[in-house]
Amino acid sequence: MNIFKQLIVSLYSPKDIATFQHQGIGKTILYVFLLVLISVLPSVYYFNTSMTSGFTTIKETLEKELPSFTIENGELTSAETSPITVNKGDLTFIFDSTGTVTQQEIAQDNNTIAFLKNEWVYAAAGQSQSFAYTMMGITTITDKDLSNFLSSMESMLPVMVPVTDAFIYLFSSAMKFIEVSLLALFGLLLQSMVNKTIQYRHLWRLSAYCVTLPTIFFTIMESVKTIVPGGLMIHWFVALIMLMLTLKEIITQDVLD
C-alpha cells in the first residue's frame, strides 16, 4: 500500500494501521514527513499571504496615514496630542506618542500593530509581543528612515519567504517526530491493557499512523481559521484512542510475535 492510501485508511481504520507495524522504518519516516507537509500548508499559506501584503500595508499606512515622528533615545515623539487608530482591512494600527495607550490595553486585540511611547507592539489571537525601541540599537530614527527600511526588507521577500517556510517545515517535522516518539512511549503502557508485549520499534511505526486523524482534523480547523478549545488535549486523546484501538486489532489478528 502506498503512503497516500495509508494516509486515507489511517483516518478511520485501526485494523489497517495494525498491518503497518512490520513495514520498513524508511517508509514510516517518509510518511511522517508527508503528514507534516500537509499539516503546515495552511500556516505557510497564511504566513506568506500576511507577510507579502503586510509589508505593503504597513509601508502605505506609515507614509499616508500616520503623522511624521521621531524615535530618539528609545522614545516616540510627534506633534500629535492624542492616540490615532487606523483600520486597514483586518489589520489595525495604533499610533500613540502621548503614552496614553499601554501594551496591556491592546494585548487581547487581533492583528494590531501599535507604535507606543516606548515600544512597538504586535497583538494577534489574544497574544502580544512588545519590542522596546532601545532594542533597535539606533539612537535616532524617523518615519522616513523606517519607510526606507521597510522598502529594503520588502525587496528581500523572495528570499525571506522560502527560508521561513523551510524553517517552519523543519521545526514542525521535529515536533511531529517527538510527538510520535512520546506516543510510542505511552504505547508501552497501553500494551499492558491488552496483555501483549510489543517492541518499541513496532509501537513507533504504529504511532506514526495513529496521529494522522488528529493531525488532519486540526489542519482543517486551521485552514478555516477555527480555534478548537482544548485542542492539545483533544489531539492527544484522539491519538491515544487510535493507538489503543490499533493495539486491540493486533491482538485480534495475532500478527505480533
Image (cartoon, rainbow, N blue to C red):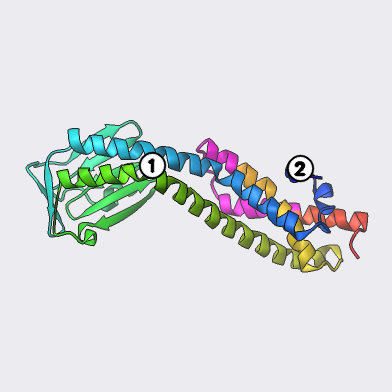
Residue matched to label 2: 12
The picture quadrant where one finds residue 8 is top right
**x and y, in percent, of residue 202 in the image:** 79, 63
> Can residue 7 be found in the magenta stretch?
no
Label 1, secondary structure: give it: helix
Start and end of the magenta stretch?
Answer: 219-242
The amino acid type of the residue labelled 1 equals Met
Which residue is identified by label 1?
51
**222 inside magenta stretch:** yes
Q: Secondary structure at mark 2?
A: loop
The residue sitting at 12% across, 45% down in the picture is 69
Query: For the point 58% across and 43% down, which residue is it?
Result: 219
Which image quadrant is residue 247 in? bottom right
Against 105, is 257 above or below? Answer: below
Q: Is residue 92 left or right of residue 235?
A: left
User: Which residue does the image show at 85% across and 52% down from the upper left?
Assistant: 19
Measured as percent of width and height from the top left, residue 103 is found at 27, 52
Marked residue nearer the N-terminal end (1 or 2) = 2
User: Residue 155 location in percent, x, y?
Assistant: 32, 42
